[in-house]
């Protein structure tokens, strides 16, 4: 498996980091975990095309994890790509319909692109055929405990405490060719995520605050610090750990170095902080 970081940031507008997006390549499949703002552009910067994405899996439906979804699906469709398999918690089916359905926000665009004679000529010149169908991603809603199986890979998932009861939130693991990658989504520490992360070859865990930051008790439950994440990863015997979802104030030189130090000390080995367009072989 190969992991490419397409977005390692938060909802904050920040030139250094797009919002959440992580690409796993295994065999012939390109599986995108989350698709936040800026992920589409980083996909292009990484040298890949929208139509190469075979699967999108959402950990949850906060905007910073799905803002570029419609852009990606539309662009893949415009390239003539095969329908993307899309998995996510409810109401991902209704959200997709709200973009691409007959009354969706993109319906006027899609009618123009598929019915205007000039647009049809452009499509035919690209090698397309008429009539031209609208985007038709294959949607499946998922919940904690579900499994997705592909060609030589499997995705398992569990509950991740974050924005309940308003959003169902998941942590996700991929196993392929004897390797295991775990993505926490936006998760507080809990036995479910710890169990999913056990013996991971790489655990990619969100980190929304630094050690020593004062927050409310409610926030503390769902925003573990670098040292807390490192200690958990050590307990579950993860082989490597990377932190992501970094915020702007956490990225200055002193805070960045301290976060790496605190996580590494608790984990017992070097912990990396994800950077946009970074690639890791798992």
Image: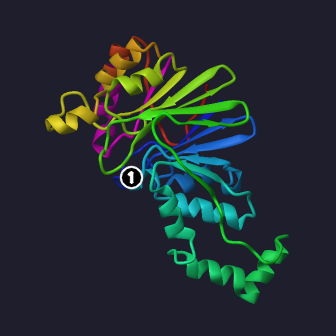
SS at mark 1 in the image: loop
Depth check, front residue: 28 or 244: 28
> What residue is shown at x 70% (from left), y 80% (from top)?
114
Residue 263 left/right relative to 32:
left
Residue 77 is situated, as x and y percent measured from the top left of the image, at 68, 64
Residue 139 is situated, as x and y percent measured from the top left of the image, at 59, 54
Residue that numbered label 1 is attached to: 62
Depth check, front residue: 177 or 254: 177
> What residue is shown at x 78% (from left), y 79% (from top)?
122
Quadrant of res 214: top left
Reply above or below: 267 against 162: above
Q: Residue at the far bottom: name it.
A: 117
Q: Quadrant of the N terminus?
A: top right
> What residue is shown at x 56% (from left), y 56% (from top)?
41
Residue 252 left/right relative to 83:
left
Residue 171 left/right relative to 22:
left
Reply above or below: 224 against 91: above
Residue 87 is situated, as x and y percent measured from the top left of the image, at 56, 48
> What residue is shown at x 75% (from left), y 75% (from top)?
132
Reply above or below: 142 against 38: above
Residue 179 is situated, as x and y percent measured from the top left of the image, at 62, 21
Residue 260 is inside the magenta segment: yes
The stretch of residues the image draws in magenta is 239-261
């Amino acid at each position: 498996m190969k992991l490419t970081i397409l977005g390692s940031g938060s909802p904050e507008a920040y030139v250094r980091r797009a919002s959440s997006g992580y690409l796993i390549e295994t065999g012939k499949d390109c599986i995108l975990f989350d698709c936040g703002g800026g992920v589409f552009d980083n996909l292009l910067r990484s040298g890949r095309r929208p139509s190469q994405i075979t699967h999108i899996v959402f950990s949850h439906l906060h905007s910073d994890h799905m803002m570029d979804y419609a852009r990606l699906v539309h662009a893949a469709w415009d390239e003539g790509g095969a329908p993307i398999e899309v998995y996510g918690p409810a109401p991902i089916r209704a959200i997709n319909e709200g973009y691409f359905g007959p009354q969706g926000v993109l319906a006027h665009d899609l009618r123009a692109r598929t019915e205007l004679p000039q647009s049809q000529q452009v499509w035919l010149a690209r090698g397309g055929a008429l009539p031209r169908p609208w985007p038709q991603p294959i949607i499946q809603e998922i919940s904690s405990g579900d499994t997705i199986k592909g060609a030589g890979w499997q995705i398992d998932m569990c509950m991740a405490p974050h924005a309940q009861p308003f959003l169902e939130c998941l942590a996700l693991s991929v196993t392929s060719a004897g390797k295991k990658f775990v993505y926490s989504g936006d998760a507080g520490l809990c036995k479910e995520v710890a169990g999913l992360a056990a013996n991971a070859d790489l655990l990619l865990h969100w980190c929304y605050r630094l050690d020593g930051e004062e927050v409310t008790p409610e926030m503390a439950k769902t925003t573990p610090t670098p040292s807390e994440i490192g200690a958990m990863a050590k307990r579950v015997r993860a082989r490597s750990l990377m932190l992501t979802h970094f915020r702007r104030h956490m990225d200055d030189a002193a805070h960045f170095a301290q976060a790496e130090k605190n996580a590494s000390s608790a984990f017992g080995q070097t912990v990396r902080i994800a950077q946009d367009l970074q690639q890791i072989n798992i």
